[in-house]
Amino acid sequence: MTWRIEITHHSGYRYKAEVTSSYNEARITPLSTDRQMVLDAAVTVSPRANVYRYWDYWGTLVDAFEVHEAHTELAVTGSSVVETSEPIASPDAVGWDLLTRPEVADEFAELLAATPYATINDELTDAAGSFKAGHDPLQACHATVEWARSRLRYQAGSTTASTPGDEALAQGGGVCQDFAHVTLALLRAMGIPARYTSGYLHPTREAEIGETVTGQSHAWVEAWVGDWVPLDPTNGEPVGERHVVVGRARDYADVSPLKGIYHGGPAEALKVTVELTRRA
């Protein structure tokens, strides 16, 4: 089964004092992949700015823009329509010997290393060792998801965008990016290449055609065990029709939805809303 999903992503900054200029990058435009097709996509900015696009190192589509007029608010809206597909079949099981080949380690070196967000501590190293001893690589992937879900509670507001995975693990709660970072760390500690995936998740399994719901940005992971296997540790469900991919990279820092620099007063608030409508 396929879904057609319309996505409207609003991001806005309000400043305490006038900002005279800003330089920004938005990563909110979905990708066309082997399991989804982008039918329409645009990014608009207020105050008005010329938006240019490029593909970054990780293959994410970046909408970059500069604002050179005084402003106290910045609004960025990404609008897209994407056709998605059902969950993919798991690849055939492979052994650990495949993952230890020099050519694999070389190709995926950046997706095997710890990062400031996907941190690897002693607890994660010990857990990874137990998974590796008792499972083949594909089984170990699913074991990491269950372990992360057993150790973390979903708690909105309990972490920030700059919280490392091990810190969220220590406090026992977090949001989707924390679940993803902990899972990434476990996979990489076992020698399984793993990448952070950012995007959107429609919250309703049996969504009505034409009904608009409030959603949010979402994060999950993809592990390489001879082929890429998507895993959603936040929900523990297969990645399928309700998931829309925006970017894939090492961790959140590589694919944050909106970032930039500016000259002027400090930011007072960031407001983000995501609206999702199933069109077919």
Image (cartoon, helix red, strand yellow):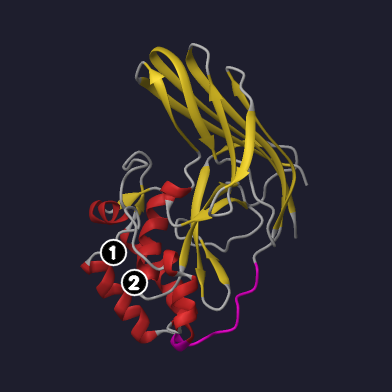
Q: Are marks 1 and 2 in contact (CB under 8 Å)?
A: yes
Range drawn in magenta:
88-97
Q: Residue at x 32, y 54 (%)?
A: 165
Residue 179 visible from this viewpoint: yes
Residue that label 1 marks: 120
| Image x and y of residue 61, in percent | 61, 45
Residue 91 among magenta residues: yes
Please state which amino acid type lies under the numbered disc 2: Ala
**Going from the N terminus, do you reach mark 1 or mark 2 first?**
1
**Looking at the image, residue 96 lies above or below residue 141:** below
Kindly tell me whether residue 176 is visible in this rendering: no
Q: The disc labelled 1 sits on which kind of residue?
A: Ile
Q: Is 166 or 22 nearer to us in this picture?
A: 22
Q: Quadrant of residue 156?
A: top left
Which label sits on residue 189? 2
Q: Quadrant of the N terminus?
A: bottom right
Instruction: Give the residue at x 49% y 47%.
Output: 255
Q: Is residue 18 magenta?
A: no
- On screen, residue 159 above or below 128: above
